[in-house]
Image: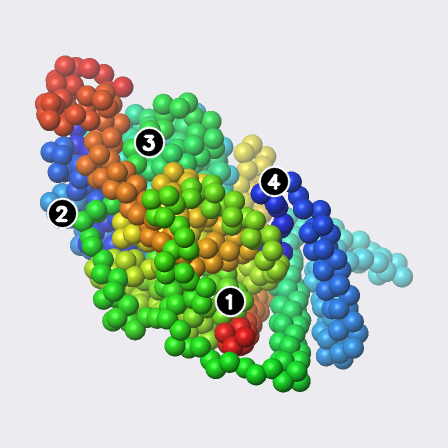
Amino acid sequence: MSDIITIVVPWFGPDTAGGAETQARQLAAAIHTLGVPVEVWTTEGRDSFSPPVPYYRAGADVVDNVPVQRFPLTPPRPAPHDPYIPIAVQRVGLPADWIDVPDHELRLLSSLMSSDALLDAIAAERDRRRFIFMPYPFPTTFWGTLLAGERGYLLPCLHDEPYARYSTYRWMFRHTRRALANSPAERALALRLYDLPPDRVVMAGEGIDLTPRGDGAAFREKHRLRGPVLRYAGRRDASKNFPLLIMYLREYWARRGTPLTLVLTGRDPVDIPLPLKAIVLDLGDVDAQERHDAYAAADVFVQPSTYESFSIVLMESWLQGAPALVNARCDVTREAVETSGGGLSFDGFAEFAVALDLLLENRALRRALGARGRAWVLENCRWEDVARRTVAAVMELDHNTFAAPESVNIQTVIRRRTFSGEPDH
Amino acid sequence: MTENRPLPSDGAPDVAAILEQLRAGVRAAHATRRQIGDDPLQRALQRSLDDLEITRVVSAHWPLTGRTLPQKAMALVNKVVRRYLRWYINPIVEQQNAFNDAATRTLRLLADAYRELAHQVAERQEADAQTHNNGIAEKGDDHTDDSTAAEDPCGGGIDPADTPTYADLMAQVRERAAAEPPVRFIELELNAALTQAQSRQSVTAHWTLTGRTIVEKMIALHHRIVRQYLRWLINPIVEQQNAANEALTAALRSLIRIDAAFRADVAAFRASRQRRQ
């Protein structure tokens, strides 16, 4: 039997929100569509927006035709607590080259949700599977890669954030067989932060669903929107620079007097001061069609975050033809805007205000930039291509051979490799 | 933090603009000092902030002396006990000092924020009064405007097939941005300071006590036993202090939210004036 690609992610399911979780779900479905055996191992938790308690039932499930195994969750340990090393790792023993990890780094790991049962299963099944662990900071990933050894692959969704510099994560990246990057900038970051040889981080990319069609006119009509519409989607907290967006927008409004509307969607609560409700419309958790309608209605999509490895919401907004205004301090989104020509970037309020002026005063420019963004997404974000690159990287196949779907049967290639006694790596 | 740093498109710093920003900063500092000097409430606030600066650092090492021989003997015993217990007491005091430092910084920033907001309001009132005195007829409120006043629906002469590149557009953005008046988003600093205070508000008396060598391990075991015994004394003190820290952080959080609401009010007012002009 060929190896089963097993995606390990802390949260997974139909009600689960979050960038990495959405990526896990769509990647699993895309790999399954290719005919490659794939499973998902996860916990009973819902997502990072919800309390760390069981939400889904533990055991076997099927999501989008992909087999899913949910393990009982191990709740985070609130501070103060001693550094914790899971039983599965203690049983196997720490590797000989284990470093002297500072306590606070181990404490960070134990303060995040995990599953000891899942880690036990990884230890037990490590010879029969190839694991893709995502995203990088969680204990399921850190301890999972340690247990999986040469059969562990990282899909890190790495951001340029302080704890990316922790010695634990440096150790993990340097001891994992290979990492899969969502964007060239994320790959460059991983190579730079962890001094990795170039072949250790592969650009597999990320996809989005390219089928949705938003109806901007209907959305404007429904919500009685007049004047320029700006759009933000995603987590509404400081980690995504959401407060910065609100401050910039407030100052822009005060200086220009432009009667604009910022349309927000998302499940996490948001605290908007009452006077700003005149320019902020928070729709909360909406269905997928309304989300896409809101993108289509937008004159400008604003992405202030600097912690991105891909930015699904940026790609979704481009798909609906909205030009983007992104934070120049985020290599990932700035690079996407530079490459696609689908928008502008800002570094500080003055550039934010002027870029917004430039976009809002010229409809043809907005349309042209939006069209460029859409064309770029259609060319670069096809899940089938991403799934092929991912399988090729994890199964260590020749990507050029594997990338030609008409001429190669994937199952045959995998079986041939397995039966030939060829070493894994 | 001033957001706008002038940088012309060729990348060389614009010395004149930097000098102007420095002068503006000095003028603002002078204005603030004058304002504090004039206003008794501001003077009282400044005195409290100065007191806070002096008293925020807690020390477990005040002088222990005595005049008589028994007092001196007692002081010596106390010194020995204090020195013996410093492994236990000092880390607790240091944690509290870290919180005090963050909370004090947040309070100072809040005071800055209030002054800056008052300055904004005063400026608006002055501008309003001037407009009124000049008898300038105001246009009606433009709430029904469907789009930005400056929008050119035909595309401002840009042919979509010949849209400028990202680099060209960004050169335009940078050039025009140099003329945008500077702004300080004090809330960014406030939120960062509050996050620091929140992360330090819980003082703990129960950190890990371990050692590597046999001797260190023996000392750690001894410390654990002493700490276990003394918890009747230390834990209630720490718990009371933590309750106070938590309450102080909550108050700071509320004040920051109120500040944000006031800023939104002022922004709405400025926006409405801007539309009328």
Residue denoted by label 1? A256
Relative side of A201 to A164, left or right: left
Characterize the local packing of mark 2: few (<14), some (14-19) or many (20 or more) Cα atoms within 10 angstroms. some
Relative side of A195 to A69, left or right: right
Q: CA distance from mark 4 to mark 2?
A: 52 Å
Relative height, residue A200 to residue B12 (above, below): above
Q: Chain of mark 3?
A: A
Q: Chain of mark 1?
A: A
Q: Nearer the viewer, residue B55 or A292?
A: A292
Q: CA distance from mark 4 to mark 3?
A: 32 Å
Residue denoted by label 2? A64
Q: Residue at x 27, y 49 (%)?
A: A319
> Disc 2 on helix, strand or loop?
loop
The amino acid sitting under disc 4 is Gly
* Same chain letter for marks 1 and 3: yes
> Disc 4 on helix, strand or loop?
loop
Q: Nearer the viewer, residue A272 or B222?
A: A272
Residue denoted by label 3? A203
